[in-house]
């Protein structure tokens, strides 16, 4: 999968992955780097990771989507492959104002993947199709 993130963010996730695999922790220097690169949503995303709020849905056809339970209890279906989240913060801060690279939900997806703590669930191709069409209608 080709990423849509800048190289500095990609390297940061690789560093987090390597360190987390070795120590099961993210050291302070990498936490500071996360805050520097992603701004205020970094702490919110880490909170979502701590709460195990990210689930990767995969179908037999190989499609993947991520569901993230937001702090308000709302479930967001995110697509890391195309860098999309239906939350209002993504639409406003990322798309409209260009104030950040991504929202806390997508950042939580990337962090969970790097740390290897993503919940996994298999769904049928039909369920995935319905999920994709519901998300597109938002």
Image (tube, rainbow, N blue to C red):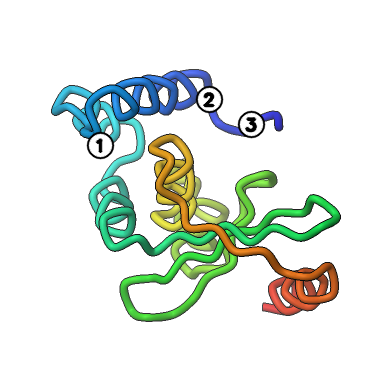
User: Cα distance, mark 3 to mark 2?
Assistant: 8 Å
- Residue tagged by mark 2? 6
The count of marks equals: 3
Residue 66, horizontal then vertical, whole percent: 58, 59
The mark lying in front, picked from 3 and 2, is 3
Residue 31, horizontal then vertical, whole percent: 21, 33
In this rendered view, identify the residue nearer to me: 124 or 92. 124
User: Residue 60 appears in which quarter of the rendering?
Assistant: bottom right
User: Cα distance, mark 2 to mark 1?
Assistant: 15 Å
Please name the residue shown 67% across and 78% down the image: 138
Please name the residue shown 77% across and 76% down the image: 127
Quarter placement of the N terminus: top right
- Residue tagged by mark 3? 3
Residue 98, horizontal then vertical, whole percent: 50, 46
Secondary structure at numbered mark 2:
loop
Secondary structure at numbered mark 3:
loop
Please name the residue shown 63% across and 31% down the image: 3
**In the picture provided, is 6 more to the left or to the right than 63?**
left
């Amino acid at each position: 999968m080709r990423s849509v993130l800048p190289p500095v963010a990609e390297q940061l996730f690789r560093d987090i992955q390597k360190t987390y695999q070795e120590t099961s922790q993210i050291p302070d220097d990498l936490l500071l780097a996360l805050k520097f690169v992603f701004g205020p949503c970094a702490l919110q995303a880490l909170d979502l990771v701590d709460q195990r709020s990210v689930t990767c849905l995969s179908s037999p056809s190989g499609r993947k989507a991520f569901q993230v339970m937001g702090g308000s209890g709302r479930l967001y279906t995110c697509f890391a492959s195309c860098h999309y989240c239906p939350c209002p913060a993504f639409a406003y801060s990322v798309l409209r104002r260009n104030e950040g690279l991504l929202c806390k939900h997508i950042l939580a997806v990337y962090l969970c993947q790097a740390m290897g703590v993503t919940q996994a669930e298999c769904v049928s191709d039909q369920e995935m199709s319905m999920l994709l069409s519901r998300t597109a209608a938002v």
